Amino acid sequence: MRDVTMPLRSPMPVPPLYPLLYEPLIRSALAEDLGRAGDLTTDAVVPADARARARLVARGPGCIAGLAVALATFRLLDPGLRLTPARSCGDSVDGGTTLALIEGSARSILTAERTALNYLGRLSGIATATAEIVARLQGLPTQIVCTRKTTPGLRALEKHAVRLGGGSNHRFGLDDAVLIKDNHLVVAGGIRPAVERARAHVGHMVKIEVEVDTLAQLRELIDLKVDAVLLDNMPPLMLREAVALVDGRMITEASGGVTPETVRAVAEAGVDMISLGWLTHSVKNFDVALDFEAI
């Protein structure tokens, strides 16, 4: 039915992130936390030779993401720590599940704790929210995709978490695809001049997507043969009509105001994908803790 190519949901496992993508972020986060004087509390209270064993534990059910980042936080602060993963990124877990064991210097474990939990909690929260919304589309081909509404500096990590939860990624940045939105159309003077300028500016490997608010705009766009259309804030009945008008000539993406309660009705309208900014910009943090054990 489609005569354009865009990635759809794949059964293939999600590969891990390269450490070079997140290690600079960890170093910066640790430096921010340690400041000019280091961990005053831990250095004052805990003897330098104290040893400890601790477990990263999920406090509730969810999908795990960012475990490798959390463990790298401990490793970068103290390469002498012994790190033993008990679960993997992408795993679904119940509350009380041990995710990893950490053994070694008590000072190092305590100092790295908050930064590690910040990464693990946020990224697992994104993966969990994605998994929950994907589950609502059981039996439907529609993809859930994220947006560029990510935490500055954490985009690669947060988009990876979406994939671990069963979703897919929209463009990563301004440089890997053309998305002509309503304000672009105002400045450019309409759909046709905007599309023609975009096509003349980018190479043949770059996809072009255009946002439309009305069926009249969509009819104008269809003749211009772009790769995808973003159907903005359209109710399900209008989406059905839009999908029928497109008739497989480009990818259809619904966006704007979609909630967990309405997502299935939007998908049943026949769109190829639904983009959700709240997956990354306002997701609930996953509850995870570091529990110390006596040695």
Image: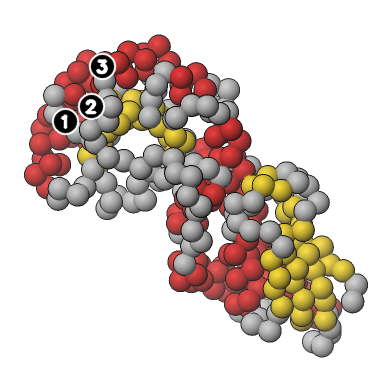
Q: Label 1: state its secondary structure.
A: loop
What amino acid is found at the position of numbered circle 3 in the picture? Answer: Leu
Separation of residues labelled 3 and 2 (CA atoms): 9 Å
The part of the image, by quadrant, that contains residue 183 is top left
Going from the N terminus, do you reach mark 1 or mark 2 first?
Answer: 1
Q: Label 2: state its secondary structure.
A: loop
Q: Label 3: state its secondary structure.
A: helix
Which residue: 23% across, 43% down? 207
Residue 79 image point, x, y percent = 64, 82
Vertical comparison of 266 with 295: above or below: above
Quarter that holds the C terminus? bottom right
Which residue: 50% across, 18% down? 265
Q: Are marks 1 and 2 in contact (CB under 8 Å)?
A: yes
Q: Which residue lies under the disc numbered 2?
A: 249
Q: Which residue lies under the disc numbered 1?
A: 225
Q: Is residue 30 visible?
A: yes
Vertical comparison of 40 with 164: above or below: below
Residue 65 image point, x, y percent = 60, 54
Residue lying farthest to the bottom in this orientation: 49
Residue 134 image point, x, y percent = 54, 34
Image check: 279 left or right of 247? Answer: right
Quarter that holds the N terminus? top left
Q: Which residue lies under the disc numbered 3?
A: 245
Q: Are marks 3 and 2 in contact (CB under 8 Å)?
A: no
Image check: 72 left or right of 25? Answer: right
Separation of residues labelled 1 and 3 (CA atoms): 13 Å
Q: Is residue 282 visible?
A: no
What amino acid is found at the position of numbered circle 1 in the picture? Answer: Lys
Residue 170 image point, x, y percent = 38, 43
Image check: 98 left or right of 123? Answer: right
Viewer-side residue, 142 vs 199: 142
